Image (cartoon, rainbow, N blue to C red):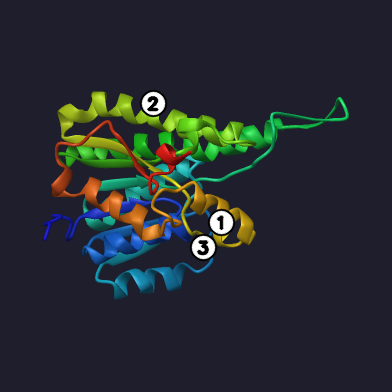
Amino acid sequence: MIETGLNGKVVIVTGAAAGIGRGTAERFAEEGCKVAAWDVSADGADELVAKLESLGGEAIFQAVNVTDVAAVEAAVAAVVEKWGGVHALVNNAGIVRDAQLVKFKGGEVVSTMTDAAWDAVIGVNLKGVFNCTRAVVPHLVRGGGGAVLNASSVACLNGNFGQTNYVATKAGVIGMTKTWARELGKFGIRVNAVAPGFVATEIIKAMPEKVLEGMVAHTPMGRIGDVRDIANAYVWLASDAATWVTGTTLSVDGGLVIGT
C-alpha cells in the first residue's frame, strides 16, 4: 500500500460542487485531508460538507468566483486562518462556451464565436487558475512546500471542433504549469497538470447514446472514465509518492490520445 502522507493536510479544490471537482474533494477527504471546497454557487453546500466529513476529512465550503481576485484572496486567507496553512491547490474550476470560430452556410457567415464566449472561458479556465495559484503560493512557500495541480484536457493536445476558447485555455494551463514548476521548485512546490479524457460527468452522461458509443470507440481501454480515475491522479500527484514529479502533464484518458 502506498503511503500518501496526506492525512491532516489542507487542500483547496475549486469547482468542487459537482463532477470531477466533487470526486476530487471526496478522494482527498478519504485520505483524511482538511478540504476547502470552492464553487461559484452555494447550492448543495451543506450536503457536500456533510459528505466530505462522513468520508473522514474535515471540510468547509466557500462560495468563490475564481475570476474575482478579491474573493479568491479572502477565501485563501480564511482557509489559512482556520487551518494554519495550505498543502495543495487543485485548480479544477472550468466552463465551456462552445461555438465554431466562423460558421458558414450557403457560402455566408451565419455565426462566429463571440467575444463574450471567448472572455468567459478565458476568465474562468485560465485567469482563474492564475488568480488562485498566485494567492496560494505565498502560503505554500511559508509552509515549506506543497503541490499545485491544474486541470488541463486532452482536447488541447489534438484540438477539438468548436472549442477554440476552451482548447486555448487548457493549452495555456500546460504552459503555466511548466513555468511555475521552474519558478517554484526551489521552494519545494511541485506543479503538475492532469489532462482528462472523456469522463462520466453529468454533462457527458446526458449526451446521446451514439455520441457516447463514439467516445468509447476512440478510447483503447474501451470505457468512459470515472471521476475517481481523475481524482486518484490528483491525490497521487499531491502525495509523498510523487515528491520528485513536477512540470508534467499526466494524461488520464484510457489511451484516448493514442487512440484518436
Task: Using the image as rendered, state which of residue 109 and residue 234 is in the foreground.
Answer: 109
Q: Nearer the viewer, mark 1 or mark 3?
A: 1
Real-space Cα distance between discs 1 and 3?
A: 34 Å
| Quarter of the figure with the N terminus | bottom left
Q: Nearer the viewer, mark 1 or mark 2?
A: 1
* Residue 207 showing in the rendered view: no
Task: Using the image as rendered, state which of residue 247 and residue 185 is in the foreground.
Answer: 247
| SS category of the residue bearing label 1 | helix
Residue 246: x percent and y percent?
23, 34
Label 2 is placed on what type of residue?
Gly
Residue 139: x percent and y percent?
24, 41
Real-space Cα distance between discs 2 and 3?
A: 31 Å
Q: Is residue 80 left or right of residue 135?
A: left
| SS category of the residue bearing label 3 | loop
Q: Is residue 228 left or right of residue 203?
A: left
Q: Earlier in the sequence, mark 2 or mark 3?
A: 3
Determine which of the numbered discs, if any, sits on residue 213 in the image.
Answer: 1
Q: Which residue in the protein does label 2 denote?
A: 175
Say if mark 1 contacts mark 3, CB within 8 Å.
no
Say if mark 2 contacts mark 3, CB within 8 Å.
no
Q: Quadrant for residue 149, please give it.
A: top left
Task: Using the image as rendered, state which of residue 140 and residue 54 is in the foreground.
Answer: 54
Label 3 is placed on what type of residue?
Ala
Count residues near mark 2 (Cα–Cα under 10 Å), then give few for <14, some for 14-19, many for 20+.
Answer: some
Marker count (numbered): 3
Count residues near mark 1 (Cα–Cα under 10 Å), then give few for <14, some for 14-19, many for 20+.
Answer: some
Q: Earlier in the sequence, mark 1 or mark 2?
A: 2
Label 1 is placed on what type of residue?
Glu
Real-space Cα distance between discs 1 and 2?
A: 32 Å
Q: Which residue in the protein does label 3 denote?
A: 42
